[in-house]
């Protein structure tokens, strides 16, 4: 079926400000009991008092405020918190489905140990005793540096406790899972000299130039971005989406500009070429608030003429020039970068190219522009003391080789971990903690990750759910889920103002779970010595109360919003050597010059480019999609257990494939069976599958449905940082 942009809109999602996405017709083709609610875990409350509790959703980094409604002691509904700065009453599908995660059947209800293959329930006392024994043995043998932690964040009290434990114990191996913040923060730091979080004032922009960012697919703070997209439309603003497929965001944009995957950075430099050549840049900002412009200008004018960029990207010269003029002539233009929901990697040079566009039009730290948000700075614990063993361990090379290979800017290089472990004759990690993340599912080249995990003698998972990573663990110490615990939420990703949230228990823990903060404090105290000395708190609640002086007010309101930014502080936002925005400097010049990063695979054999795409109904992080969301997926994504691969009809014709037939999809790292779906909204030679399917954990609503894109992908190291920069992979599609 041929689809143009207008017809695509007919089934694209709605966008009313402050509301959730419009639901699709329910799919009743299988698991019909999900709709009749004939479940053993049906949340049917007894009669009782109706109450509401304010909290913060942690199912994504969006930082939305939620109001949880209860009847008696039973949660019956989760709504967006009215008046919350981020979402103001709105809530996404995943946030609204949190009740299914609370009462769902995949929760880990008690500590578990893998004994000769099967899982066995064990007591908390036995589990903690086993870990402490291993910790003491490693320290006794000068192997403190062989423990590591993979965490979903490095901000907040829980990540700080984990990092503090490793420091006091004697290991430098705290590693955060990657995100678009890695390169965005680096781009901000290298040009503005500040370690700050990037915020985007989409509510007040009049022209959004998006390089693949899925504002409707769940990018950064999903509800806030949807609100911003709606406000843009209501205020007469415009949006241009640059990407190789017609996403829902592209369909809801005023312009959709196709580019070859992986060339978005070249497009940004081509736009800069036009803006500079035609004198459309903000001369007042460039002359008074920037340095290094002439050097960067020379690079742009000599290397990225529209004719050259057209050859790189596949876009028309006229389209490049027209888009550049429209962006530069807007009153409050905003350029943003990050494909889909922001989980697809990109190179530092891509982010630098896009970030410089905002400087070129002078819209930094102004209404409607890109805003630097100060990193949270409220954890003021005394420095952890270290004994001789810890000091020696902290001097060892990090297991991800950070800092040892010239990549001085990246903070963590999780993508290197599987290769390092698998290449070693003896594993460099003897104990691994995993918190708030599912790396076995979420990292590229799944088989390599599994192989690496199998080599680690003791893997401890703090997961609340049976997932792909817990399946590879030796011990599971289940954490309370976010509706059962106190915890700080120090920022909302992408929100343009400093905001602090707090989760609080809306119900007592349902099962024999414990807060991870309590577990870490107990492990430290039972390990003894200076490790115990670094953890003087009785429990996590005491630690939180000591850290947050305003805990009482936070419990009532649910959040704290710090002072708003103003245009008057623009010069003060630059802490570079020149005290200005630096288009070019010695650090940037020392990085490899811009060149599109190629996809892995032999082009002569793998003649297609496979890229992932995101959907609001497919959670692709630590938490898998709840049953209702899986059942609400479009038939263009999932039919029964079969995932559909998007193929342009012209591409399918060359391959001899028909719409709806089965095909084998293969890449250098994996193979899977897919159904062919004809889609005119994808460039010829490019194919796409959704991200967030293909789970293998103990979840009957998710397991066996579709393919996990990461089993087909492979990491590609960014020469500028060492971070994964793989935006896709070469692939082959053939008849079954």
Image: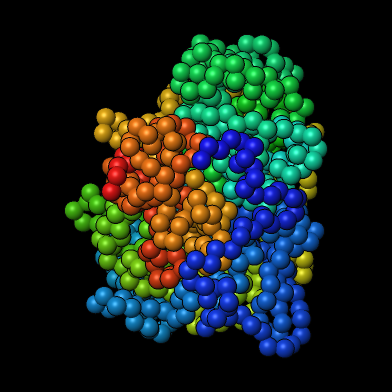
Q: Position of residue 331 (x, y in %)?
A: 77, 27
Which residue is depicted at the point 55% across and 63% down? 27
Q: Relative to the observer, which residue lies in front, 156 or 638?
A: 638
The residue lying at 64 percent from left, 65 percent from top is 96
Q: Is residue 91 above or below residue 114?
A: above
Q: Nearer the viewer, residue 503 or 294?
A: 503
Report x, y in % for residue 383: 53, 58
Residue 164 in sight from this viewpoint: no
Residue at the extreme left of the image, as rendered = 425
Q: Taking the image as drawn, is residue 673 in sight?
A: yes
Q: Is residue 280 left or right of residue 36?
A: right
Residue at the farthest bottom position: 47
Residue 417 position in % (x across, y down): 34, 50
In the figure, residue 327 lies in which quadrant?
Answer: top right
Looking at the rendered structure, the number of numbered marks drawn on it comes to: 0
Q: Position of residue 34 (x, y in %)?
A: 54, 73
Could you tell whether 244 is left or right of 254 in the image? left
Give me the residue at 25% from left, 61% from top: 455
Give the vertical position of 541 relative to 620 (above or below). below
Report the front residue among 37 and 527: 37
Residue 427 falls left or right of residue 246: left
- Asked which colour scheme the image uses, the reply is rainbow
What residue sits 27% from the left and 62% below the top?
454
Quadrant hosting residue 193:
top right
């Amino acid at each position: 079926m041929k689809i143009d942009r207008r017809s695509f809109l007919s089934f694209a999602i709605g966008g009313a400000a402050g509301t959730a996405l419009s639901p699709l017709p329910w799919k009743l083709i299988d698991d019909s009991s999900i709709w009749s609610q004939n479940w053993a875990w049906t949340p049917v409350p007894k009669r009782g008092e109706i109450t509401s509790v304010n909290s913060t959703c942690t199912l994504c980094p969006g930082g939305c405020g939620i109001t949880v409604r209860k009847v008696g002691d039973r949660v019956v509904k989760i709504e967006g918190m009215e008046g919350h700065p981020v979402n103001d009453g709105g809530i996404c599908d995943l946030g609204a489905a949190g009740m299914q995660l609370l009462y769902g059947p995949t929760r880990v209800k008690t500590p578990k140990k893998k004994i000769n293959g099967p899982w066995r329930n064990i007591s908390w006392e036995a589990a903690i005793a086993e870990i402490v024994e291993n910790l003491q043995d490693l320290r006794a043998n000068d192997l403190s540096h062989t423990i590591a932690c993979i965490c979903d964040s490095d901000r907040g009290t829980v990540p700080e406790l984990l990092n503090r434990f490793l420091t006091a114990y004697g290991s430098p191996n705290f590693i955060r899972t990657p995100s678009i913040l890695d390169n965005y923060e680096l781009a901000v730091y290298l040009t503005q000299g500040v370690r700050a979080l990037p915020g985007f004032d989409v509510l007040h922009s009049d022209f959004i130039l998006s390089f693949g960012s899925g504002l409707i697919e769940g990018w950064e703070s999903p509800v806030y971005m949807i609100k911003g997209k709606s406000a843009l439309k209501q205020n007469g603003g415009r949006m241009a989406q640059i990407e190789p497929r017609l996403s829902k965001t592209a369909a809801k944009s005023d312009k959709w500009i196709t580019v070859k995957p992986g060339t978005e950075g070249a497009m940004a430099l081509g736009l800069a070429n036009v803006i500079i050549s035609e004198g459309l840049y903000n001369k007042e900002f460039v002359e008074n608030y920037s340095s290094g412009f002439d050097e960067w200008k020379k690079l742009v004018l000599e290397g990225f003429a529209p004719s050259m960029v057209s050859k790189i990207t596949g876009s028309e010269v006229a389209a490049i020039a027209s888009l550049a003029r429209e962006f530069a002539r807007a009153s409050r233009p905003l350029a943003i970068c990050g494909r889909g929901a922001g989980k697809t990697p990109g190179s530092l040079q891509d982010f630098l190219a896009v970030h410089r566009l905002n400087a070129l039009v002078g819209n930094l730290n102004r209404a409607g522009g890109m805003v630097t948000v100060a990193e949270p700075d409220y954890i003021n614990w005394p420095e952890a003391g270290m004994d001789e063993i810890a000091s020696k361990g902290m001097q060892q090379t990090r297991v991800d080789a950070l800092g040892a290979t010239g990549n001085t800017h990246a903070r963590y290089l999780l993508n290197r971990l599987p290769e390092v472990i698998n290449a070693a004759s003896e594993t460099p990690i003897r104990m691994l903690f995993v918190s708030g993340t599912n790396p076995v599912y979420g990292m590229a080249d799944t088989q390599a990750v599994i192989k690496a995990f199998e080599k680690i003698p003791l893997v401890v998972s703090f997961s609340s759910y049976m997932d792909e990573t817990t399946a590879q663990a030796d011990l599971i110490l289940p954490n309370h889920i976010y509706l059962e615990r106190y915890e700080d939420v120090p920022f909302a990703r992408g929100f343009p103002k400093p905001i602090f949230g707090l989760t609080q228990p809306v119900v007592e823990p349902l099962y024999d779970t414990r807060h991870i903060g309590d577990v870490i404090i107990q492990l430290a105290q039972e390990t003894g010595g200076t490790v115990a000395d670094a953890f003087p708190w009785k429990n996590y609640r005491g630690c939180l109360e000591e850290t947050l002086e305003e805990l009482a007010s936070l419990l009532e309101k649910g959040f704290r919003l710090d002072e708003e930014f103003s245009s008057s502080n623009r010069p003060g936002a630059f802490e570079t050597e020149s005290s200005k925005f630096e288009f070019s400097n010695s650090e940037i010049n020392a990085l490899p010059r811009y060149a599109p990063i190629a996809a892995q695979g032999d082009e002569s054999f793998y003649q297609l480019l496979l890229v992932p795409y995101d959907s609001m109904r497919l959670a692709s992080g630590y938490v898998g999609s709840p049953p209702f969301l899986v059942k609400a997926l479009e038939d263009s994504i999932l039919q029964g257990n079969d995932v559909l691969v998007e193929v342009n009809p012209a591409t399918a014709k060359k391959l001899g494939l028909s719409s709806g037939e089965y095909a084998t999809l293969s890449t250098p790292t994996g193979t899977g069976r897919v159904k062919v779906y004809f889609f005119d909204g994808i460039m010829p030679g490019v194919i796409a599958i959704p991200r967030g399917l293909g789970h293998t954990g103990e979840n009957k609503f998710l397991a066996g449905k579709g393919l996990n894109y990461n089993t087909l992908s492979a990491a590609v190291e960014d020469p500028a940082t060492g971070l994964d920069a793989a935006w896709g992979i070469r692939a082959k599609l053939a008849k079954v």
